[in-house]
């Protein structure tokens, strides 16, 4: 490739909904959640992987990836948006993929597809078509049923032309977007989707660990 692609992995959360332990350090089949995630990117066309970590786990992550020459550990921010912005400032590139550290079922094939597609699309997110019936509710009462034909569930990675997403972060600095594609949408930019996998779940609770064990055993 005649261009550079970075991956930013926000890992600054405190895992408050998971329990006493940081979910990224939870082991599944004797391997940490974050290690599954990073290894998928190490096998991909990505040049550099930047983990924006909660300060409480930085030493463990540095030890975990001490032999990985293309992995950089930096301190994350108080919010996901702040963590990603730290990652964007840590290393220049042409394109950047942003992926939740707690999505260990991501595949290298999907990462490489995102890289291939972002070159022409400039901004995209992995997403899956919504299969459940969605209800709009207020005060415990159903207001209406939303047509799911146009609905997708957003996942990560999300991929962007580097300058495009960095400028969005600069313009919206100090806010609290939980989705980088949403920042570009807010600014009126076009964001595309590529089809993801229903297995690419985000680990939030202990129950998700049990689901991940089944997928990762295979």
Image (cartoon, rainbow, N blue to C red):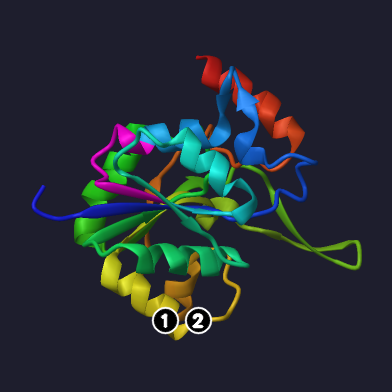
| Rendering coords of residue 30 (x, y %) | 58, 18
Q: Assign a secondary structure to mark 2.
A: loop
Of all residues, the one furthest to the right in this rendering is 140
Q: Assign a secondary structure to mark 1.
A: helix
- Of residue 148 and residue 177, the one placed in the foreground of this image is 177
For residue 45, side relative to residue 180 (left or right): left
Residue sitting at x 70%, y 53%: 14
Residue sitting at x 36%, y 64%: 90
| Rendering coords of residue 188 (x, y %) | 40, 80
Residues under labels 2 and 1: Cα distance? 5 Å
- Of residue 64 and residue 106, the one placed in the foreground of this image is 64
Q: Label 2: which residue?
A: 173
- Can residue 102 be seen? no
Question: Does the magenta portion include 172?
Answer: no
Judge the density around disc 2: few (<14), some (14-19), many (≥20) Cα neighbours within 10 Å.
few
Judge the density around disc 1: few (<14), some (14-19), many (≥20) Cα neighbours within 10 Å.
few
For residue 117, side relative to residue 207 (left or right): left
Look at the image and give the residue range highlighted in magenta: 41-50
Q: Label 1: which residue?
A: 170
- Of residue 3 and residue 105, the one placed in the foreground of this image is 3
Image marks 2 and 1: residues in contact by CB distance under 8 Å? yes
For residue 182, side relative to residue 133 (left or right): left
- Can residue 177 be seen? yes
| Rendering coords of residue 42 (x, y %) | 32, 36
Residue sitting at x 57%, y 63%: 80
Residue sitting at x 26%, y 49%: 115
How many numbered dots are placed on residues in this image?
2
Q: In the rendered view, would you say 28 is above or below 125?
A: above
| Rendering coords of residue 24 (x, y %) | 60, 39
Question: Does the magenta portion include 46?
Answer: yes
Q: In the rendered view, would you say 122 is above or below 34?
A: below
């Amino acid at each position: 490739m005649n261009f550079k692609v970075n991956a930013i992995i926000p890992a600054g959360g405190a895992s408050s909904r998971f329990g006493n332990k940081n979910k990224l350090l939870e082991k599944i089949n004797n391997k940490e959640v974050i290690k599954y995630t990073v290894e998928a990117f190490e096998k991909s066309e990505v040049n550099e992987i930047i983990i924006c970590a909660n300060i409480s786990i930085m030493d463990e992550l540095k030890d975990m990836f001490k032999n990985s020459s293309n992995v950089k550990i930096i301190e994350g921010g108080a919010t996901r948006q702040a963590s990603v912005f730290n990652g964007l400032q840590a290393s220049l590139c042409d394109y950047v993929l942003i992926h939740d550290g707690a999505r260990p079922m991501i595949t290298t094939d999907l990462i490489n597809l995102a890289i291939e597609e972002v070159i022409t699309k400039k901004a995209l997110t992995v997403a899956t078509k919504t299969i459940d019936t969605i209800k709009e509710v207020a005060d415990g009462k159903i207001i209406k049923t939303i047509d799911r034909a146009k609905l997708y569930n957003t996942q990560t990675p999300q991929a962007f032309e580097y300058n495009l997403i960095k400028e969005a972060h600069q313009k919206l600095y100090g806010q609290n977007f939980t989705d980088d594609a949403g920042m570009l949408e807010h600014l009126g930019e076009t964001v595309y989707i590529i089809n993801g996998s229903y297995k690419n779940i985000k680990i939030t609770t202990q129950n998700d660990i049990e689901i991940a064990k089944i997928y990762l055993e295979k």
